[in-house]
Amino acid sequence: MDDLIKQILTARVYELAERTPLEPATTLSGKLGNTVLLKREDLQPGFSFKVRGAYNRIAQLSARERAAGVICASAGNHAQGVALSAAHLKLTAMVVMPETTPRIKVDAVQRLGAEVVLHGDSYSDAAAHCTTLVRQNGMTFVHPFDDPYVIAGQGTIGHELLQQCPHLDAVFVPVGGGGLIGGIAAYIKALRPTAQVIGVQPEESQAMRASLRAGSRVTLDHVGTFADGVAVKRVGELTFALAQRHVDEIVTVSTDQICSAIKSIYEETRSIMEPAGALGVAGLRQWLAGHPQQDKTLIAVNSGANMNFDRLQFVAERTLTGERREALYAVTIPEKPGALRYFCEHIVGERNITEFNYRLARRDEAHIFVGVGVQSGEERAAVADLLRQHGFAYQDLTDNELAKEHIRHMVGGRSAETAGEVLYKFEFPERPRALRDFLAAMSGGWNISLFHYRMHGADFGRVLVGFEIPAGEEPRFESFLKNLHYEYEEETGNPAYRLFL
């Protein structure tokens, strides 16, 4: 028997972790034409599967290693798993977290008795500082995913799944560094090789998918932060090897699809998953869209429920588009009496209007930003057909991130005096003084003609900035951008900008 399988079968997780239920998702099953089951790892102590691997690793430590205390770097669930495990075993624990970590997670770790050290703006910064502290204080490092005992601890989920549902056809697993899918896939493939193990990653954080395609581990330059629990730039060496051997496929999902999955799980369980925790359901639906199945038994791992309350408004807002129940359009209408009424009667009809913003463009025309309730992609296309038939110029903005993140909150107009304006999106770590520091960095001698910031409840703030760049100053402006050390993307050519700002 494979060494990892033996480690899974002998893992010491149940001294602290729970055997979580596998529950039917009746509404999803009916909609998708398959039996959908949810593995409720959100019901673990600490509300995440991470306690399994953390406890199994710490429980295996020698007396000398225990006496030194344990240390880890984490922005969330692994930190709580380590803190819980250390408290249960009465060990000293230190957790290094980025300064961007939401207060709710810092407080949770401190309540469990661990010392929290805040350092840097990202997990990478915290991990580097953790390495320095290990050299200084000699504490025992507990890796979040690339450790045999951690992987084996997570693999006990695979063991439970085959006990609870021996004839499962496919399991959908959130993927960050790869510890969870590595353990689950190794066990399930050993005992039921015909079952498919499918990983799920956000479109903005697909380090495992990129590595499998390249045939070796790659390091991403940037990862998205909405699903912060899987925001990993480089997967583990051990976990990558396991994925190469045992994982059938990695699918990616959008932020909107994750938000829709959070809602679907809430409707089934009345529990609110964190974004990473809902990846399994989001990926299951995405996979079925490209691989139609009937009467199969499909399992989604609900990996965690440490949702920041501040994110709920953003999740609700993006759920409609994620479910394809809202279509967003920019429409040009004639500036004359009765034009709005005509638009509502002949285009919107009996459909719900979810959002409506109006801005006079010229004396003969106006622009509207409108959200329309639809039931499917086909109905979205039907609304577009109506717009064409009635002679309205329009842009479909349903999949336009700039429109959804910024434009819908700031529809206005452009000053006639604005000259040489260019538009850029920026990201900066969301921590105390972050916006002030960003504004200070913007003082590069360029006139700011537009500025929009909105708290999204994520680890990174997103800002939209317009600059007036005089003719001939473009090279100096490009140099200015590169020296800012902020992630940025130009949006000057975005149709939503051209119409509404």
Image: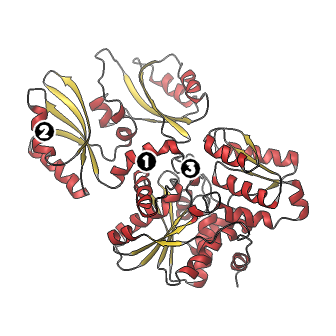
Identify the residue position indicated by label 3 in the image. Answer: 228
SS at badge 1: helix
Residue 338, placed above or below residue 245? above
Question: Which of 408 and 51 lies nearest the eye of the viewer?
Answer: 51
Label 1, label 2: how far apart the Cα atoms are: 30 Å
- In 3D space, how far apart are the residues under numbered discs 1 and 3 (Cα atoms)? 14 Å
Q: Earlier in the sequence, mark 1 or mark 2?
A: 1
Structural distance between the alpha carbons of marks 3 and 2: 41 Å
49, 99: nearer the viewer = 49
429 to the left or right of 120: left
Q: Which mark is residue 343?
A: 2
Q: Nearer the viewer, residue 182 or 481?
A: 182
Q: Residue furthest front?
A: 270
Residues at marks 1 and 2 touching, judged by CB atoms closer than 8 Å: no
Measuring from the top left, give residue 265's x and y in whole percent. 44, 61
| First in residue order: circle 1 vs circle 3 | 3
43, above or below 94, in the image: below
Residue 215 at x, y = what percent?
58, 65
Mark 1: amino acid:
Val
SS of the residue at dot 2?
Answer: helix
- Left or right of 81: which side holds 378? left
Secondary-structure class at tag 3: helix
Residue located beneath label 1 in the image: 315
Residue 233: x percent and y percent?
Answer: 60, 51
Please indicate, yes or no, whether residue 387 appears anywhere in the rendered image. no
The amino acid sitting under disc 2 is Phe
Residue 347 appears in the picture as rendered: yes
Determine the image quadrant of residue 14.
bottom right
Please name which of the two marks, 1 or 2, marks the residue nearer to the observer: 1
